[in-house]
Amino acid sequence: QVRLVESGGGLVQPGGSLRLSCAASGSILVINAMGWYRQAPGKERELVASITSGGSTKYVDSAKGRFTISRDGAKNTVYLQMNSLKPEDTAVYYCNAVVRTSYTGNYWGQGTQVTVSS
């Protein structure tokens, strides 16, 4: 099995920054991709940013220029640096990973709350 543990959420004022971390552990052979999704109250979960094992990244339009996703392959960890945060970034942020063990599966973290408010 694979476990994803997130950290780094919290309360921040508009214009502030937060850094989310997500560490994967378990019977991992290869991590094909990792990413961050978010879900605000009353809204569907959306992809915020993703990164492949080769380093290719993808961002939702609202995050471009403000958020940066990166990964440490040796630590099986993905990071999301969020700058210039806005109230509309408030949501529960979920880590996601596509991981090959004895098969290839899609795994989720438990979620971490990010609240942007003055």
Image (tube, rainbow, N blue to C red):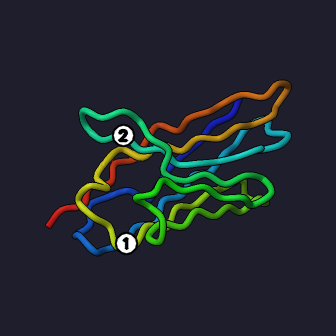
Horizontally, residue 26 falls left or right of residue 81, namely right
Horizontally, residue 36 falls left or right of residue 111, namely right
Q: Of the residues under marks 2 and 1, which one precedes in the sequence?
A: 1
The answer for how far apart the CA atoms under marks 2 and 1 are is: 19 Å
User: From what the image shows, is residue 107 above or below residue 115?
Assistant: above
User: From what the image shows, is residue 28 above or below residue 16?
Assistant: above
Q: Quadrant of the N terminus?
A: top right
Point 44% across, 70% down: residue: 66
The secondary structure type at the circle numbered 1 is loop
Point 28% across, 74% down: residue: 15
- Residue identifier under label 2: 39
- Residue identifier under label 1: 17
Horizontally, residue 113 falls left or right of residue 29, namely left
Give the residue type at disc 1.
Answer: Ser
Q: Which residue is at the far top?
A: 103
Point 42% across, 46% down: residue: 93
User: From what the image shows, is residue 86 above or below residue 48?
Assistant: below
Residue 77 horizontal/vertical position (percent): 66, 56
Q: Which residue is at the far front?
A: 61
Point 44% across, 61% down: residue: 63
Residue 64 horizontal/vertical position (percent): 48, 65
